[in-house]
Image (tube, grey):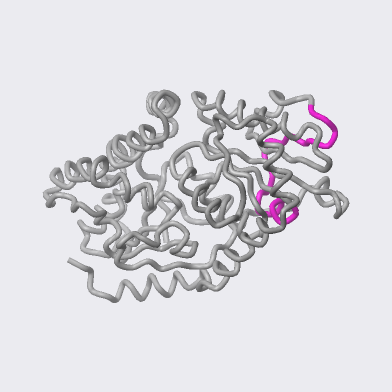
Amino acid sequence: MRLATAASMERLVTRSYGIPHLPAGLDWTADPDVERRLTSALVRDGNEAFCRMLYGEVLAGRCVLPMFEDLLEHAMHWAPDVVINDCAEWAGPLLALALGIRNLAADNGLLRNVWDHHADHIRPRLTEHRSALGLGPEPRTPSSLDHGVLTPAPRELLLADLPIPAVRSYRHENPRQAREELPRWVRELPRDTPLVYVMLGSSGNCAPGMAAGFRRANQSVLEALADFDGAVVVAVGRGNVSQYLPQPRHVRVVEYAPQTLVLRRADVFVTHCGFGGSREAIEAETPMVMLPWFADQSLNGREMAARGMGLLLDRFAATPSQVRDAVFEVLTETRYRAAVSAVRRQMMALPDLAEIVDDVIESCAEPVPA
């Protein structure tokens, strides 16, 4: 197995997860022009404009051919039997098509967004790439999903109504990073002390153009919880802690917290509704106050709120008093935790994540759909 991604991801891939890294493609997150234009679209015109640019112009546009060329060069020396691609990455499916092998799309939470934007914004870009490679036009439904989808969540959560040929759902497992442990100051909290964990994004806080919005959201939550009768942990990203100091003694602002471990102790999770964090909260049976921002986050928030797993607020309009009231309600009303527990039981009934290996090997023996 090789994991192909931008060279800037090597440290995370190899040191944190121990997977052989294959440097390939562009790191679009390091392009200041892309960051500036995406931020401008989000702030000026909202999430739909942001998604149109992200999926159409960036991910299905400028990123595809550089990644394809790198992958093809690697494939000439290391012949793959199958490609497993991020559902919002299209060089992998093109490589599989060129090599006559199968690709399986891994759902990272963006699949619903990808489906919704495919016909109008993604398909035209992919048709251009396919034409340059001597291939026919991209179909009206995503061809990258034709061979199957792998998702670490029940299909019913976000994909129930999508006519995808084959969806394989697996039980969510928290990522294991080396040498992680629960901080002592969390371990030493009295068991009857309620803990609110706040994490409002790991991408917005490192994009300069989005930093102001990230700070405003964190400041609003900190103001809301200034008099909270319990403990509060707020993770704000590298180099950002000093912006939020000083704080009351019950509030701890940190660069990073081992989220999967903290969530097991937390009573409420104030979240931006990222796909990973949402599943981690379900695994920990922690109810949520949801403040989504961009991409798939609003979809995730609406689905979880509809299932009763927490309260959904407008990130841009919610006042500190509304955030405070939402945290208090989710903390004190047991129905929210019960709803999370019900979804967790559904998730835990799925096949073990380790079964992906056998399923992928088995799929390699099947004829590749035309």
Residue 33 vs residue 227, the one in the foreground? 227
Relative placement, left or right, of 101 versus 149 is left
Residue 220 location, x and y as percent?
66, 29
Q: Quadrant of residue 175?
A: bottom right
Q: Is residue 264 magenta?
A: yes
Residue 277 falls inside the magenta stretch: no
Give how far across and how far down residue 328 sits, in percent. Answer: 73, 44
Indicate the position of residue 152 as horizontal and vertical percent values: 49, 62
Residue drawn at x 47%, y 55% is 20
The quarter of the image holding the C terminus is bottom left
Query: From which residue to which does the magenta span run?
Result: 247-265
Q: Quadrant of residue 63?
A: top left
- In this rendering, position of residue 41 left or right of residue 335: left
Q: Give x and y (percent) for residue 202.
A: 56, 39
Name which residue lies at 54% across and 30% down. Answer: 316
Residue displayed at 50% across by 48% down: 302
Left or right position of 12 against 37 = right
Q: Quadrant of residue 257?
A: top right
Residue in the foreground of this view, choosing between 219 and 317: 317
- The answer to whether 203 appears left or right of 33 in the picture is right
